[in-house]
Image (tube, grey):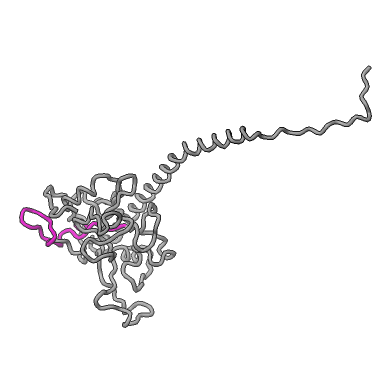
Amino acid sequence: MNRSNPHRTARPWRSRGFTLIELLVVISIISLLISILMPSLSRARAQAKTVHCLARLKEFGTAIAAYEGSNHDALPPARWLPDTSKFRGFEPDAVDPERPIEYGWSEILFTYVYRESVAVMESYPVLRNIEGQRWEEYFQCKAVGDTSVSGGHYRVYLPSWSAGSYALEAGGVYGNTTRANPSRSTARETIRPKMPLLGDSNDRSERGDGLGTDDCSYIDGGEANYVGSNGINNGNRFSDRHSGGTNYLFQDLHAAWNTKLREALARDYDLNGIVDIEVQP
């Protein structure tokens, strides 16, 4: 008969830990999985930003339609001069008569939709996100990493937005001497079908009119694909940051992504089938 030894104590159970080789194998497998998944996650994030941008453009379309209903079917002007004397804390000495404060379509739409006066003593404050918490970057694309006052604004395409405010040159050419007037608005019914009303602008915008880094709310004809002074990253032009394409809001107020329209507009500003380009942008 087997009898246990009363004086014998059981050994405590000990779990065997990972060896260094096993640990390295696990880390290698995790790293491999991450390297496989990261491109898919990056594409998913980029796609989400594209969808968000298109939804924002559709919201602009709704606001534009509401504005038109109360303003004789006219679009808001792309540029206008507010009466700064009615601004809170107005000081006459703070206004440079050579460079007056300019507002645009975004300041009008913000005031119209939110019933809140803008009244900021800087040009295009809503579009440029001068008071970020106040506007909540509403007029800047989420795909732009830098949301400072010079990056990623939505801008109107002037040959559409101000259609009818210019006369074509001989042969139906829309040239540098017949540019549209940003201070004049138009009705959408006068705009050629399939023309964009507004779209993504370059992350670092510079106007193509020789005024350096001055900002504005619109992109004019040949500037649709304008490179800019450094030849790389600036220029007042539409941006192809969404997977090589640009998001636009079109004449019929639908929003869509397009990869070829930017270059087409750089050659034929009003899409009338006649090449307008005078100097290759």
Rendering coords of residue 208 (x, y %):
22, 60
Farthest residue toward the front? 20
The C terminus - image quarter: bottom left
Q: Quadrant of residue 202?
A: bottom left
Residue at 33 percent across and 56 percent down: it is 203
Residue at 36 percent across and 51 percent down: it is 53
Residue at 43 percent across and 45 percent down: it is 45
Farthest residue toward the top? 1
Q: Which residues are magenta?
A: 154-177
Q: Nearer the viewer, residue 121 or 75?
A: 121
Farthest residue toward the left? 170
Left or right? Give the position of 91 relative to 212. right
Residue at 27 percent across and 45 percent down: it is 258
Q: Quadrant of residue 152?
A: bottom left
Say how many tags the image has.
Answer: 0
The N terminus - image quarter: top right
Rendering coords of residue 41 (x, y %):
45, 42
Residue 206 in the image: above or below residue 29: below
Residue 246 in the image: above or below residue 87: above
Q: Nearer the viewer, residue 209 or 261?
A: 209
**The stretch drawn in magenta includes residue 171:** yes
Q: Nearer the viewer, residue 260 or 252?
A: 260
Rendering coords of residue 257 (x, y %):
30, 46
Rendering coords of residue 11 (x, y %):
83, 32
